[in-house]
Image: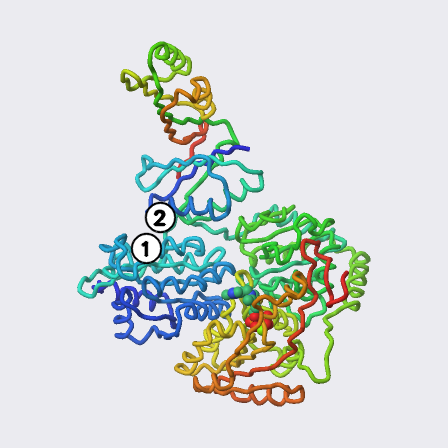
């Protein structure tokens, strides 16, 4: 099953390489990985999406917790949560394609953020499967370039991941 | 407050940490530190002949005492030479701090002379590593390093020290921190009371219980609590290779050690048990054999300080995260006050069954009128040293024979690289022990393959007068490799010979030691006695043993616990 694990990490050089190293060293999957500082500059927030049987997921969270620089972590997929990913995508857009693309972008609630005579650059945010859906709807033949941020997530309701 | 340079602060921190010995080798990036060492005499430095040996020395010291060992090396090749030693300590959870020089911070990333990214290289084989970014951080970093290395599940910690951090002309206020603040590191200090209660209830209700103890009992200094609990319950106990000595081997409740080369009775009892109390053990593949066939009728209670060790390879029914000594103490108290008692009849019939298994095999091997068997050498050593020596070992058949036939009644005396299986570990580990235990007998039971992996340390032994006894079970082959080739490759002995062996006697003498060769059976006892009688000399005893011997029992690959070879022809 796909999991979203969110980690509060000491904002120290080398801390990220420990997390990444752990995944490759122990043969765990990384599907996406995002990391950025938080409002507390001593902490980074790292989100990793991974897949694996329950035993492996349990090991991942335990092994992550063992890293000295990991302060706290939560498996967001264990409860209600919000996940978002940002995609910037460059599409071939000439002639009648232009109106068609515009319509699809609207349906997916994206925005065209840059335009040339033959190219649209579209910005789209949402859960990963929504982004997948958009690419599918557009059809890969028109896609010139895709960049995705990887997943960020947060629990719903009052639950917070903090010190 | 005092003003000190980074190098002086480093050495002062070691003093304030109570470090008596460090093991190391100098070089460019560590020279400021070596100069600071020279100007004091509290911290004593042992100069090895290869950095790997410095780490194994620190490791041997740590295993024998339970205290963290300390290593000091230079950057680049000095640092990379420590990696095998660090990985060895990591796999067996040995507390240790490795101080590595590094090129000046201004040069890092420029492929400077003797620059290696030691933070990156060591990362997968350390508990943690720390890099000094300002000289004033040194006392705190050293304090943290020892704290992390020796608390929770212990392990090696590397400290990377760029040369400019130890420059002599810059001085800073020195104070050694009394406490460590680490918000992200909080090892468990006690087990969950509810889980402990549940475990005790299960233990008292069991009909075919067994205790399976590991190296964690020794690391957690819990042999006393374990022994008391096991005696109180009257249950059988087995331990892992790493747990040897955690419970007296001469006690009748002890079934010997388990796993690949464990005893018949220990493996049989595990397989047929209905309850396993695992204490500080990690269900390693050398213990479980095929995990899907592991002990089908057993429920499992697992105590470990490291939550990641629990349900990693084998699911635990009752996990208990906590220090083994504290948890066992609570268990004992509950057992004592409980109205429930183990079912005497069930336990008696369980013991009858176990005694049958014991009688069936025990530990037997064929002796020969003229060839010396490695097993009999170990048995004789056990007798001649009253079972009270510190025994280090290398890796191979000799290691298994040493572990099988030297019966340890005390913890911290069997010293071997169980997890990584590092040939070359034995001699430097023995040196680390002898240095701090000069009045104890320290034996290194090794093979002619392994001993050559750190043979240069005979020179260090001469310099510091370390009279260890090297017992070379010389079978003129990489015996364990050869055994696997016999069993799995139709005896195609690909590169398992040790051709052109040196004359070990002359070699020992060249380094200023005594060499004794034993190749006749009748010489074995008198010459071993002669060697052991030379209290203040290192004696290299080169014993020509049976070249064709195999280690048994041996679990059948991919089978269950009870599938074993008992000799070259007998399989159960
Ligand atoms: C550094 C290292 N290299 C290779 C091995 C693989 N290995 C395991 S046992 C063994 C043979 C050891 O030979 P020896 O020391 O003579 O011991 P014996 O088995 O003959 O008693 C080898 C090569 C190892 N454990 N460590
Ligand atoms: Mg050999």
**Subunit under mark 1:** B
Give the quadrant of residue B544: bottom right
Mark 2 in CB contact with mark 1 (< 8 angstroms): yes
Image spot of residue B111 (x, y percent): 28, 55
- Location of the C terminus of chain B by quadrant is bottom right
Which residue, given by chain and number where applicable, does mark 2 sit on? A14
Q: Residue at x 74, y 49 (%)?
A: B297
Front residue of this view, candidates B296 and A8:
B296
Is there any visible trace of residue B198 in the rendered image?
yes
Which residue, given by chain and number where applicable, does mark 1 sit on? B131
Is there any visible trace of residue B411 in the rendered image?
no
B463 left or right, relative to B430: left
- State whether discs 2 and 1 lie on one chain: no
Decide if ligand 1 comes within 8 Å of the CB at mark 2. Answer: no
Q: Residue at x 78, y 65 (%)?
A: B355
Residue furthest left as drawn: B169
Task: Give the answer, above or below, for where B380 lies relative to B58.
Answer: below
Task: Give the answer, above or below, for where A72 lies relative to B567.
Answer: above
- Which numbered disc covers residue B84? none
Task: Give the answer, above or below, for where B290 lies relative to A48.
Answer: below
Image spot of residue A160 (x, y percent): 43, 32
Tag 2 secondary structure = loop
B58 left or right, relative to B557: left
Ligand 1 rendered quadrant: bottom right
Image spot of residue B227 (x, y percent): 64, 65
Give the quadrant of residue A92: top left
- Location of the N terminus of chain B by quadrant is bottom left
């Amino acid at each position: 099953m796909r999991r979203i694990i969110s980690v509060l990490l000491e904002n120290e050089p080398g801390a990220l390489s420990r997390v990444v190293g752990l995944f490759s060293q122990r043969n765990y999957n990384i599907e996406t990985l995002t990391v950025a500082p938080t409002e507390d500059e001593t902490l980074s927030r790292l989100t990793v999406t991974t897949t694996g049987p329950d035993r492996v997921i349990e090991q991942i969270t335990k092994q992550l917790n063992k890293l000295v620089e990991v302060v706290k972590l939560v498996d967001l997929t264990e409860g209600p949560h919000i996940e978002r990913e940002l995609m910037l995508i460059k599409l071939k857009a000439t002639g009648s394609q232009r109106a068609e693309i515009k319509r699809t972008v609207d349906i997916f609630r994206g925005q065209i953020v840059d335009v040339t005579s033959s190219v649209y650059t579209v910005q789209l945010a949402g859960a990963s499967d929504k982004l997948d859906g958009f690419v599918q709807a557009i059809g890969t033949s028109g896609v010139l370039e895709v960049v995705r941020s990887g997943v960020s997530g947060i629990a719903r309701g009052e639950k917070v991941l903090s010190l | 407050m005092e003003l000190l340079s980074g190098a002086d602060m480093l050495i002062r921190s070691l003093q304030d940490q109570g470090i008596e010995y460090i093991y190391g080798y100098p070089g460019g990036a560590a020279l400021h530190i070596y100069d600071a060492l020279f100007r004091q005499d509290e911290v004593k430095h042992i100069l090895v002949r290869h950095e790997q040996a410095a780490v194994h020395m620190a490791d041997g010291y740590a295993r024998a005492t339970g205290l963290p060992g300390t290593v000091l090396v230079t950057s680049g090749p000095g640092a990379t030479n420590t990696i095998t030693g660090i990985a060895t300590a990591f796999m067996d959870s040995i507390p240790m701090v490795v101080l590595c020089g590094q090129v000046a911070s201004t040069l890092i990333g420029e492929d400077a002379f003797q620059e290696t990214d030691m933070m990156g290289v060591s990362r997968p084989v350390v508990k943690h590593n720390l890099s000094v970014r300002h000289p004033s951080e040194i006392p705190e970093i050293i304090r943290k390093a020892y704290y992390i290395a020796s608390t929770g599940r212990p392990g090696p910690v590397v400290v990377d020290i760029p040369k400019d951090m130890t420059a002599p002309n810059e001085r800073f206020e020195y104070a050694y921190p009394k406490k460590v603040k680490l918000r992200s590191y909080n090892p468990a200090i006690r087990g969950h009371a509810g889980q402990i209660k549940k475990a005790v209830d299960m233990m008292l209700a069991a009909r075919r219980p067994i205790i399976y103890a590991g190296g964690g009992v020794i690391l957690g200094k819990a042999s006393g609590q374990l022994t008391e609990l096991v005696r109180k319950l009257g249950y059988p106990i087995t331990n892992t290779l790493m747990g040897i000595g955690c419970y007296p081997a001469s006690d009748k409740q002890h079934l010997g050690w388990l796993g690949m080369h464990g005893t018949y009775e220990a493996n049989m009892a595990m397989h047929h048990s209905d309850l396993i109390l695992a204490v500080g053990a990690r269900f390693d593949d050398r213990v479980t054999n095929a995990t899907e066939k592991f002990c089908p009728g057993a429920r499992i209670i697992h105590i470990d300080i490291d939550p990641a060790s629990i349900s990693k390879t084998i699911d635990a029914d009752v996990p208990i995260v906590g220090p083994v000594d504290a948890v066992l103490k609570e268990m004992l108290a509950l057992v004592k006050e409980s109205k429930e008692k183990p079912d005497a009849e069930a336990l008696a019939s369980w013991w009858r069954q176990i005694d049958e298994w014991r009688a069936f095999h025990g530990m037997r091997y064929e002796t020969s009128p003229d060839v010396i068997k490695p097993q009999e050498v170990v048995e004789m050593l056990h007798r001649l040293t009253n079972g009270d020596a510190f025994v280090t070992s290398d890796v191979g058949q000799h290691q298994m024979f040493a572990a099988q036939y030297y019966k340890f009644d005390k913890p911290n005396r069997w010293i071997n690289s169980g997890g990584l299986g590092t040939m070359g570990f034995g001699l430097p580990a023995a040196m680390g022990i002898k240095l701090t235990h000069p009045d104890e007998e320290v034996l290194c039971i090794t093979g002619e393959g392994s001993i050559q992996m750190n043979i240069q340390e005979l020179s260090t032994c001469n310099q510091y007068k370390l009279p260890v006894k090297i017992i070379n079970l010389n079978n003129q082959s990489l015996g364990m490799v050869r055994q696997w080739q016999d069993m799995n490759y139709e005896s195609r002995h690909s590169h398992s010979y040790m051709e052109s062996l040196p004359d070990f006697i002359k070699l020992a003498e060249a380094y200023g030691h005594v060499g004794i060769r034993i190749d006749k059976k009748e010489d074995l006892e008198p010459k071993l006695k002669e060697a052991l009688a030379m209290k203040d000399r290192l004696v290299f005893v080169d014993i020509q043993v049976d070249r064709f011997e195999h280690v048994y029992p041996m679990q059948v690959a991919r089978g269950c616990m009870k599938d074993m070879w008992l000799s070259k022809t007998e399989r159960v």
